[in-house]
Structure formats: structure tokens, C-alpha cells
Amino acid sequence: MKGRYPDRFVVFANMSYDDLNTPGFGKRVTARLEQDVKNGAQGLKIFKNFGMDLKYASESACTRTIRNLTPSLKKCAELKLPVLIHVAEPSAFFDPWDYHNERWRS
């Protein structure tokens, strides 16, 4: 799509958290981001799993203030890349899935 419509689309990189619990994660994820930018990424998108269900081996939840992301966010600032962070869901997403829920479909 970028080849055909280069001015209509912006491609964002994503982070892989497969090695989150391994020492050096922050440096590795930043190196991957730099490679993504070399490959054409124009921003960074942090999906909602980061604040919702992604956990450390210790079972503590990850949050957007995690120290491991600081190098990547600094790199984004240095490269003047936008960062999109999915921060919320409508409350109905957490209510029972029945006909009272506005998201329920019959």
C-alpha cells in the first residue's frame, strides 16, 4: 500500500514482548525499533495488551511507565516519531456480555 499510495498511509512498528522477562529487553526492543524505522516504519504503536494482560514472570502487570520502554521512547523522540498508545476501552467491554450490554448484538 505504501508503494502505490506513499502519501496516504503511515506505517507503525509494534513491539514484540516475547523476551520481556529476559535481561536487556529495553536495549533489544529499541534496536528492533531502529531496524523497523530503517525498513520504513514511521511511528510506534503500543497496543492495549501492554496495560491489560501482558505480565512479567512475577505476575505483576506492565504499565506504560515501565522503565524498559524508556530507551525506545527516547529513541522515538530522537527520531521525531509519533507514538500511539492504546489507553482505554469503553466500560461496556468489561460488563457482562448479555442483552443489557450496549455492545451485545442479537
Image (spheres, rainbow, N blue to C red):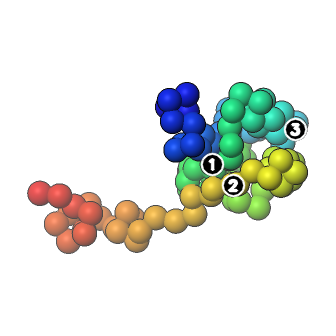
Where, by quadrant of the figure, is residue 60 drawn?
bottom right
Percent of width and height locating residue 51: 61, 57
Q: Is residue 97 visible?
A: yes
Q: Residues within 10 Å of mark 3 (few under 14, many from 20)?
A: some
Residue appearing at x 63%, y 56% in the figure: 84
Q: Which residue is mark 3?
A: 27
Residue 1 as seen in the image, left or right of residue 61: left
Which mark is first along the chain, 3 or 1?
A: 3
Q: Quadrant of the C terminus?
A: bottom left
Which mark is first along the chain, 2 or 1?
A: 1
Which mark is first along the chain, 2 or 3?
A: 3
Q: Which mark is residue 70?
A: none
Residue 62 as seen in the image, left or right of residue 105: right
Q: Which mark is residue 83?
A: 2
Q: Residues within 10 Å of mark 1 (few under 14, many from 20)?
A: some
Residue appearing at x 57%, y 43% in the figure: 7
Cα gap from disc 1 to disc 3, whole angstroms: 18 Å
Cα gap from disc 3 to disc 2, whole angstroms: 18 Å
Q: Secondary structure at mark 3?
A: helix
Q: Which residue is mark 1?
A: 45
Percent of width and height locating residue 97: 26, 60
- Foreground residue, 42 or 98? 42
The amino acid on which the numbered mark 2 sits, given as a three-letter code, is Val
Percent of width and height locating residue 31: 83, 33
